[in-house]
Amino acid sequence: MEIPEGVCKELNQELSVLSEEQLKTQCENIVQEICNGDEMGVRSDKLYDCVCLVFLEGAKNDIGKEQYIEVLEANEIGNKQKRSVLAEVYDLHKEMVRNILKETTTTLTKIIGVSWKLDFFVRPEHKEISPVFLVTLKTKVKDNEGKVDFVCTHEEMEDLITKLKDAQQQIERSASHVNKNV
């Protein structure tokens, strides 16, 4: 989990003027705003922005309380007691925040399986038998599984396979380029 340096500085400025109890109350209010969309009254916009970012990043990366404390410590955020307060509130509400992220995040359909069957299309009037593929793509969106069925000719299947191979090669080239630059 990465926290931008500017956020760390602003969060430290905000933490320096709050007691542990005030911080806990403010963090609880911020979580309520995130989860319910409620305006909880007077608060520091900088504190709100920074706490939202560190809570949402932690929840997005699904890190535990101890790892969360380590990230805060590595970024030199607050003292031990304030890191502990942030981690306690984060851990208490992590699953609720993750559920909000799941609801608000757009996810693409993933193909998790493919099955196919060769069949023959018979046209009696032309005395013609054409091979066709019956293809089923098993899909998953969030926690819901589904399927997509389609029929294609031999030529259409070859075209599909060629395009998938091209996409795979492009991904491999992109990945090797990124790995060289890292």
Image (cartoon, rainbow, N blue to C red):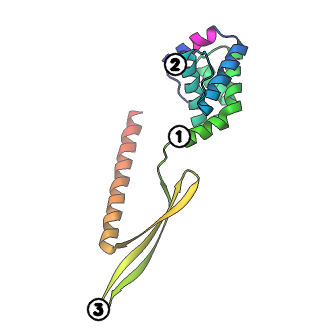
What type is the residue that disc 1 sits on? Answer: Thr
Amino acid type of the residue tagged 2 in the rendering: Val
Between 8 and 17, the one lying in front of the other is 17
Residue 35, position in %: x, y?
Answer: 62, 33
Tell me if residue 45 comes above or below residue 1 in the rendering.
above
The residue that disc 2 covers is 7
Quarter of the C terminus within the rendering: top left
Nearest to the eye among marks 1 and 3: give it: 1
- Disc 2 crowd rating (10 Å Cα; few below 14, some 14-19, many 20+) is some
Q: Does the image show residue 64?
A: no
Is the residue marked by circle 1 packed among few (<14), some (14-19), or many (20+) residues within 10 Å? Answer: few
**Residue drawn at x 30%, y 65% as measured from the top left:** 159
Image point 57% across, 31% down: which residue? 56
- For label 1, the SS is helix
**93 and 110: which is toward the camera:** 93
Which of the 4 quarters of the picture holds residue 69?
top right
Q: Residue furthest left?
A: 126
For the residue carrying disc 3, how many other residues have a C-alpha within 10 Å: few (<14), some (14-19), or many (20+)?
A: few
Residue 118 visible in image: yes
Give the extent of the magenta segment.
11-16
